[in-house]
Image (cartoon, grey):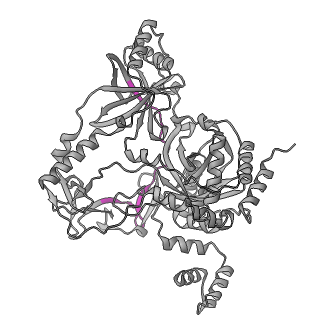
Amino acid sequence: MPERDAADGSALQPYWSGVIAFSLVRVPVSLYAAHRRSRPALRLVHDDGTPLSRRYVCPEEGKPLTSDEIVRGYEVEEGSWVIVRDEELDALEPAKSREIDLRRFVPRDALDPVFFERPYVLVPEPGAAKAYLLLARAMEEERRAGVATFVMRGKEYLVAIFADDGVLHAETLRFAAELRAPADLDLPEPALADVHRVAELERAIDGLSADGLDRSLLRDPHAARLSELIEEKLDAGVDVVEARRPEPDEPEVDLAAILRGRLSATAARDGHDTNGQDRDAYAAADAGGRTGRTTTKRAAVTGALMARTKAELYEQAKALDIAGRSAMSKEELARAIRERR
Amino acid sequence: MSARALWRGVVRFAGAEVPVKLYAAVEDRDVHFRLLHEPDEVPVTRELVHPETGEVVPFADAKRGYVTAEGDLVILEPDELDALAPEPSRVIDVVRFTPRGAIDPRWYVRPYYLGPDGEQEAFAALAAALERREREGLARWTMRRRGYLGALRMHRGHLMLITLRSDPAVLADAALAAPADADLDPRELDLARRILETLAAPFEPEAYADTYRQRVLDLIAAKARGEPVRLAPPPERPRFEDLGQALRASLERERPRA
């Protein structure tokens, strides 16, 4: 399974990119996991203090592998595999892999949290801020959540999309078939409860009740003990390996910053109306969102170019006066245009 | 079909003690793939390697370390980490009760059903009391030397324990907000709300099924038989000049026909 987020300090990556369809209104977005790995994150290290790298190897040949030597397989019989490629998984439900088509809006309070799986935050693509903010405000005022199914990284999900403070959140939900009914577990019928015992317990519950939740109660004591141990060792200089190179001073990119940038007043005002920009974002989703591998900026740009027809690319190459364009294939045109930018 | 309990514990708070059994409420129905080395279709394995010397280190021999903001590393020995692990216990300690919904469901990880472990009456009394007070409990317990945090609550008449994330980062993200000065056209907002109204529906999770999963299995079966695979192209969608047009066209499309 691909890493859902990088614990190694690399940039925050979206888990999926596509379009929220609200009838004929289209909002290109990226989906980011709302949950980060627990702090403090520990690395696997060598005795000399160097963090270890992970790699895939072929156990038979004993050699390390690059990503293009690796494929996804399903074991149909012992030792017998069927290889399944990203493009094939994508093409099973091409619409659902690229868009979340919100056809139903349910009362926000009707969402049963027993179905909740994972929380995400939606970030609008450049140019989509106006449509995003409008949809969010309408959903908040109507107190409704959009429900749909879509395909993300080779799996179908039921998803609820709702707005809080103008920000769109997504929560993947379990399918009803995945949740066992109590009858399936053969749980005994509830016995009759003794009235006095119930009253006693109610008093005990009241004694421990509060109106709201004190967040300090949610703190992980293990994480706190680990932090203490780390600090003790740092202070005492025990088992500390100093950095050989100073770490580059990169500002930490967090979800709040990304969201602020995309939703800023300038973005909402000056951005083109989303429906026109759809195709590029769509294609960018093709380039990066499916495979689960890290979307690089280059891949996204090339992907966006590849969504155009060869005739369109040729016109663009002509405008840029790219030499040798008449002999180029569609791929070559896309690469040449990208390199010109 | 009687299910097997995953674990046995004792719910405890303010002198009350209710022995319980824990049952998985979720069935994993994923289609499981393995990563293979393409030419010989051998399942790949992972290994740890020193980035400079190329030395392969067995997972069991690797130490754990914490990297500070300055890039220094603190090595943590296995026995030190082991000393931090909580002691084994059967107690599910309920530390607080709150109104239903006070524990944000975005923190939910996995639900488990609870059943009585012997003392059926005590169990029934607990369920009845929680139902009558309309409350949920915040519980802590240890399973397999790992600490857990959970919500103790009723679901459709049955007692459940739902594990929670304790990562403070989730709580921080809950505070995300759009800029207050968003310039929204009131007519467009009105159109959007009206579209929402025409698409209003009750929440019916049973109405949805994972159809994709079956398609994946069908694809695998077809490939196993050596059949060629036809790749469907992405669909064409109508384009609009601007958001206002798209909204008006949407309302037109969704408006129920007289």
Where, by quadrant of the figure, is residue A53 drawn?
Answer: bottom left
From this view, report whether residue B39 is shown above or below residue B67: below
Q: Residue at x 58, y 48 (%)?
A: B214
Where does residue A73 sit, x and y in percent of width and height? 46, 58
From this view, report whether residue A22 is shown above or below residue A331: above
Q: Residue at x 30, y 33 (%)?
A: B142
Where does residue A85 sit, x and y in percent of width and height? 51, 62
Outermost residue to the bottom: A323
Outermost residue to the front: B181
Q: How many numbered dots are placed on residues in this image?
A: 0
Magenta residue check for B34: yes
Magenta residue check for B202: no
Is residue A88 found left or right of B148 in the rendered image?
Answer: right
Please state, as top left, top right, bottom left or bottom right, where the C terminus of chain B lies in the image.
top right
Where, by quadrant of the figure, is residue B243 drawn?
Answer: bottom right
Where, by quadrant of the figure, is residue B181 drawn?
Answer: bottom right
Where does residue A97 sit, x and y in percent of width and height? 59, 57
Magenta residues (range): B21-46
Q: Nearer the viewer, residue A241 or A60?
A: A241
Residue A282 visible in rendering: yes
Where does residue A64 sit, x and y in percent of width and height? 31, 67
Q: Residue at x 21, y 59 (%)?
A: B73
Is residue B182 found left or right of A228 in the rendered image?
Answer: right
Residue B230 visible in rendering: no
Q: Nearer the viewer, residue B48 or A194?
A: A194
